[in-house]
Amino acid sequence: MPVTLIKERFPSKVGEVTLGATAEQGGTRDSVVVVGGDNLLPFLHFEGKVVNRPVIAMEVTDIVPPWNEAIKAQFGDVLDNPAAWAKKCVDEFGADLIYVKLIGADPEGLNRSPEDCARVVKDVLAAVGVPLIVVGCETPEKDNEVMAAVAEATAGENLLIGLAEQDNYKSITAAAMVHKHNVIARSPLDINICKQLNILINEMGLPLNKIVIDPMIGGLGFGIEYAYSIMERARLGALANDKMLSMPMICTVGYEANRAKEANESVEAFPDWGELAERGVLWETLTATALLQVGASILVMRNPAAVKLVQHNIADLVEVAEA
């Protein structure tokens, strides 16, 4: 007996956002990255079209980060040189994007100046040909100064900058508008705040196709189920023609997965958990692959071994969708 597949059709789609700019477009990138555009639930290829495959951004910090040695050892001697680090991420690990986090600007840390931070970003731009995502140190007052300087110094490059949040979105949005960049709109796992923030940013004059949503997530075993449900609601809202939820989503997988003790504690401390080198890779990989299934467009990752596994997963999913 033949079985008829019930195919769901949606009235709208996820909006597209273009990151980076080539020389012809006023920038210096070798190529651009376009995210979003799907008119279906993730990878249900028989119901629609996967327009742009999900991409991986590898995290680079402006100072040596306090990560565990199992991750740091894979980068060798480049962690004190953001430009060389970024180049290694692209050339050896195949990163689609570089996510520069300016933790050195933290007033409680090195308190680097906005000008110093802008120089770091310019150095990374010179070292790689892929588009950049740039965020500050997550101290709002300092980030407003830092991101204004970065946006001005990189005018024309069409960066994705952040983080614009409900209580701190105006300065970063204004910098993006003046210097023609995109903005990350971050909301704390709350669909209503997510939508309201997008409305506020759009009302300032930034087009919807210049906004990427960061819904905030949890790592494997530490809130990923709730994050999944929020992202699912956003995706369904976009497909139902809610324009204020129609943006592609970015997920800070490396940060959240590696906050878990399971991704950091040694085998000596927990013999039943297995070797840390393997466990940490799987913790980040499984966090990433779960979020792919709910519509993440950009995965921000740390562990090169996990990146390799997720790249294979994305290739397999897209191959099936294109078959």
Image (cartoon, grey):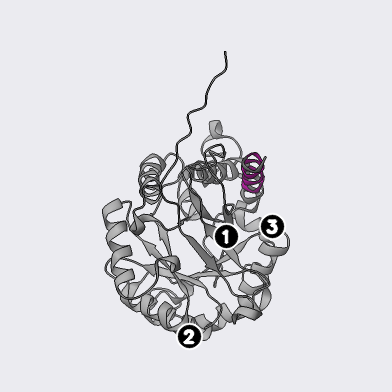
Left or right side of 100 for 311: right
Quarter of the image where one finds residue 25: bottom right
Q: Amino acid at mark 2?
A: Glu
Q: Position of residue 215 (x, y in %)?
A: 38, 54
Q: Is residue 311 magenta?
A: yes
Report if residue 106 is visible in the image: yes
Q: Tag 1, which secondary structure?
A: strand
- Which residue is more in the foreground, 145 or 41? 41
Quarter of the image where one finds residue 199: bottom left
Q: Residue, x 63% and y 61% (percent of image)?
A: 96
Circles 3 and 2 in contact, beta carbons < 8 Å: no
Report if residue 107 is visible in the image: no
Of callouts 3 and 1, the N-terminal one = 1
Answer few, some or many: residues within 10 Å of disc 2's Cα (few below 14, many 20 plus, some between 14 and 19).
some
Residue 164, above or below 254: below
Mark-to-mark CA distance, 3 and 2: 30 Å
Task: Specify the segment rendered in magenta.
Answer: 310-320
Q: Residue, x 48% and y 81% (percent of image)?
A: 150
Judging by the rendered image, the residue that carries numbered circle 2 is 152
Judging by the rendered image, the residue that carries numbered circle 1 is 57
- Which residue is more in the foreground, 57 or 284? 57
Q: Amino acid at mark 3?
A: Phe
Of callouts 3 and 2, the N-terminal one = 3
The quadrant of the rendering that contains the C terminus is top right
The quadrant of the rendering that contains the N terminus is top right
Residue mark closest to the camera, 3 vs 2: 2
Looking at this view, name the residue that lies furthest to the top.
Answer: 1
Mark-to-mark CA distance, 3 and 1: 11 Å
Residue 144, above or below 222: below
Q: Tag 2, which secondary structure?
A: helix
